[in-house]
C-alpha cells in the first residue's frame, strides 16, 4: 500500500492510494490531470512524465535505458524526471510526491 | 510463413548503413531506418521540416495532386502549436464515455452483421465501413454521411494499382469545398462547424485552414485504420490462442494493441524536407532534399526490441513509433486506440476462432523494395462462440 501525492500543472494537490500496478495507471484511475498514459504504459509516448519532488529520486529507482532515451528528447526533462508508467507501486514509495511535468511542446 | 505475417524488408539496410535511397517522381528520399535516428530526426523539426510545399513530405509525393496545406500536419513549430492546441481537445473526445458508447454501438452492429454472414471479405465488408462509420463519431456528423465516404474506397488519394490518383484527390477537394459552404449557411455541432467558428491567435480560421484540417482527418486515418483492423483479423485468425488469451486476460488489452500497432506499422514512413546540409547516421543529406522517417523499420530495430519480428502481446517495454514521434505525432491516435480496444473486446467475446480462406496482399512499392502493409482483399470465416 502506498499513498502518492500528485501536484498538477495548475498546482492542485491530489493524494491517491494504491496497492499494485504502475503509478501511471493509478493516476489515470483517479483522473489526475495531465497524466494521460496514452500508450497504456509501455514507454512509448511520454505522456506520464513527472518530476520526483523533495530529492527522493532514489526511492523510485533510476530511469531505465529505454525510458532515459525517450526523456532525452523531452524539453522539460531533468535529473528528477521519471515516466511514471515505469514506477511500480510498493511500500517503498509510500508518501512520494510527484509533480506533473509540463507538456512537451517540442 | 503465415498469411498474417508482415515481413521486415529493411533489416539488411538498417543494420549495414542505417539508410536507404529511393527515387520518387524525381524528388529522391533518404529513408532513415534506425530507431534512434528516426526519433532524433523527428524531434529535430528545424532541420527536418514539415512546412514545405503541401504534399511534399508525403511519400509518394502529393505535390502534383493537391495544393491545400494539411493542418497541423504540414506546419512547423511555433505556428504548429497554435493549430495543435486548437484541435487537440476535439481529438481527445474518444476518452469520454459517451463517445465510447456511440463507437461501441457501431462496432457491435458491424460485428453482428459479420457473424450473421459467417464469411466476409474483411477489407470492404468490415474495415472500410467500420472506419467510415467510426469517423462520423470523430467528426460528430450524421451517421448517414458514412455511405459517401465508404464509396471513396480504402484511400482518398490512391486506388488499387495507382498510388497517386488525381481524380480522387480532386473529388475530396470538391467535397470539402461543398461542405464548408453548406456548413456556413447551416452551422451545426460537427467539426466543420466548430472549426469555422474557431479563432487562432485572435483571428478566425480561414476556409482553407478549415479544409486543411478536414483533409488531414479524411486522409490520415483511412488506409491506416483499415490496415490496422484488417491485419488484426488476419493475426487473430492465424493465432486462435491469442483470441482466448485476450478474452481471459483483458488486463493485457492495451499492451496488446500497442504491440499489434508496432508489428503492423500501418504507416510505413513519413517524409521531411531538409533545411540545411547535414548528416544522419554519418550519411550526408543535402539542403532541400527529402528524408523519410521509416516508422516500420524503426519498429523492428533489434537494438531496441527483443525478437522484433514476433508479436508478443504482453510486451512490457515497447517504445514503438507507429503513431509517429515528436510534435507531429498522430492526432487520431486516441480515436484509433479507443476503436481497437472496443473492437478487440467485442471480437474475442463473440468469436471462438477464424479461418483465412483466401487473400490478396497489399504491397507498397518503395522503388526496388516492397513492403507488405496489409491486404487488398482477405476472406475470413468467423466461427462464433
Image (cartoon, helix red, strand yellow):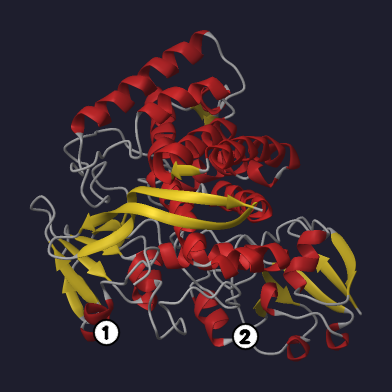
Q: Secondary structure at mark 2?
A: loop
> Which residue is at 83% across, 59% downward?
A30
Q: Residues within 10 Å of mark 1 (few under 14, many from 20)?
A: some
**Disc 1 sits on a residue from what chain?**
B
Q: Residue furthest top?
A: B185
Whether residue B105 sits left or right of residue B242 in the image: it is right
Same-subunit check for callouts 2 and 1: no
> Which residue is at 50% across, 80% downward?
A69
A18 and B376: which one is in front? B376
Q: Residue furthest left?
A: B26
User: The N terminus of chain A is located in which quarter?
Assistant: bottom right
Residue B91: which disc?
A: none
Question: In which quadrant of the rendered view does residue B124 lie?
Answer: top left
Where does label 1 land, which residue?
B15
Whether residue B375 sits left or right of residue A58 in the image: it is left
Where does label 2 land, which residue?
A63
**Disc 2 sits on a residue from what chain?**
A
Whether residue B197 sits left or right of residue B168 in the image: it is right
* Residue B211 visible in the shown view: yes
Q: Secondary structure at mark 1?
A: helix
> Which residue is at 57% across, 21% downward?
B142
Image: B376 above or below B278: above
Give the alpha-carbon distance from disc 2 to disc 1, as whole Å: 27 Å
Image: B94 above or below B2: above
Amino acid at each position: 500500500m502506498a499513498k502518492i501525492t500528485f501536484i498538477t500543472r495548475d498546482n492542485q494537490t491530489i493524494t491517491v492510494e494504491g496497492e499494485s500496478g504502475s503509478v501511471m495507471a493509478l493516476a489515470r484511475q483517479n483522473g489526475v490531470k495531465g497524466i494521460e498514459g496514452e500508450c497504456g504504459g509501455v514507454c512509448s509516448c511520454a505522456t506520464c512524465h513527472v518530476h520526483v519532488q523533495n530529492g527522493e529520486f532514489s526511492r523510485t529507482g533510476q530511469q531505465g535505458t529505454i525510458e532515459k532515451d525517450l526523456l532525452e528528447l523531452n524539453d522539460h526533462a531533468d535529473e528528477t524526471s521519471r515516466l511514471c508508467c515505469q514506477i511500480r507501486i510498493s511500500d517503498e514509495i509510500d508518501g512520494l510526491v510527484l509533480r506533473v511535468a509540463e507538456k512537451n511542446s517540442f | 510463413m503465415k498469411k498474417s505475417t508482415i515481413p521486415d524488408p529493411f533489416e539488411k539496410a538498417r543494420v549495414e548503413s542505417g539508410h536507404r535511397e529511393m527515387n520518387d517522381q524525381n524528388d529522391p528520399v533518404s529513408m532513415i531506418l534506425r530507431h534512434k535516428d528516426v526519433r532524433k530526426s523527428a524531434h529535430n523539426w528545424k532541420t527536418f521540416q514539415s512546412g514545405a510545399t503541401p504534399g511534399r513530405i508525403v511519400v509518394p509525393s502529393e505535390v502534383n495532386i493537391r495544393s491545400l496545406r494539411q493542418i497541423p500536419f504540414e506546419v512547423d513549430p511555433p505556428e504548429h502549436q497554435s493549430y495543435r492546441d486548437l484541435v487537440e481537445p476535439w481529438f481527445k473526445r474518444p476518452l469520454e464515455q459517451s463517445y465510447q458508447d456511440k463507437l461501441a454501438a457501431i462496432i457491435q452492429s458491424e460485428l453482428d452483421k459479420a457473424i450473421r454472414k459467417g464469411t466476409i471479405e474483411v477489407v470492404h465488408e468490415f474495415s472500410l465501413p467500420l472506419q467510415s462509420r467510426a469517423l462520423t463519431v470523430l467528426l460528430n456528423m450524421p451517421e448517414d454521411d458514412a455511405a459517401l465516404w465508404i464509396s471513396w474506397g480504402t484511400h482518398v488519394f490512391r486506388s488499387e494499382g495507382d498510388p497517386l490518383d488525381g481524380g480522387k484527390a480532386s473529388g475530396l477537394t470538391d467535397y470539402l469545398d461543398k461542405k464548408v459552404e453548406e456548413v456556413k449557411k447551416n452551422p451545426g455541432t460537427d467539426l466543420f462547424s466548430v472549426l469555422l467558428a474557431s479563432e487562432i491567435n485572435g483571428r478566425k480560421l480561414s476556409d482553407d485552414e478549415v479544409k486543411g484540417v478536414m483533409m488531414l482527418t479524411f486522409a490520415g486515418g483511412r488506409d491506416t485504420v483499415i490496415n490496422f483492423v484488417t491485419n488484426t483479423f488476419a493475426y487473430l485468425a492465424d493465432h486462435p490462442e491469442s483470441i482466448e488469451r485476450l478474452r481471459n486476460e483483458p488486463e493485457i488489452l492495451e499492451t496488446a494493441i500497442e504491440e499489434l500497432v508496432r508489428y503492423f506499422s500501418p504507416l510505413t514512413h513519413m517524409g521531411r524536407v531538409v533545411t540545411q546540409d547535414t548528416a544522419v547516421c554519418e550519411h550526408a543529406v543535402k539542403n532541400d532534399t527529402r528524408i523519410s522517417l521509416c516508422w516500420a523499420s524503426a519498429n523492428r530495430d533489434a537494438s531496441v526490441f527483443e525478437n522484433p519480428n514476433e508479436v508478443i502481446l504482453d510486451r512490457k517495454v515497447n517504445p514503438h513509433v507507429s503513431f509517429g514521434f515528436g510534435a507531429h505525432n498522430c492526432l487520431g491516435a486516441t480515436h484509433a486506440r479507443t476503436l481497437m480496444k472496443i473492437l478487440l473486446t467485442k471480437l474475442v467475446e463473440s468469436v471462438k476462432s477464424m479461418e483465412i480462406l483466401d487473400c490478396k496482399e497489399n504491397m507498397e512499392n518503395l522503388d526496388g523494395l516492397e513492403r507488405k502493409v496489409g491486404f487488398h482483399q482477405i476472406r475470413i470465416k468467423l466461427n462464433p462462440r
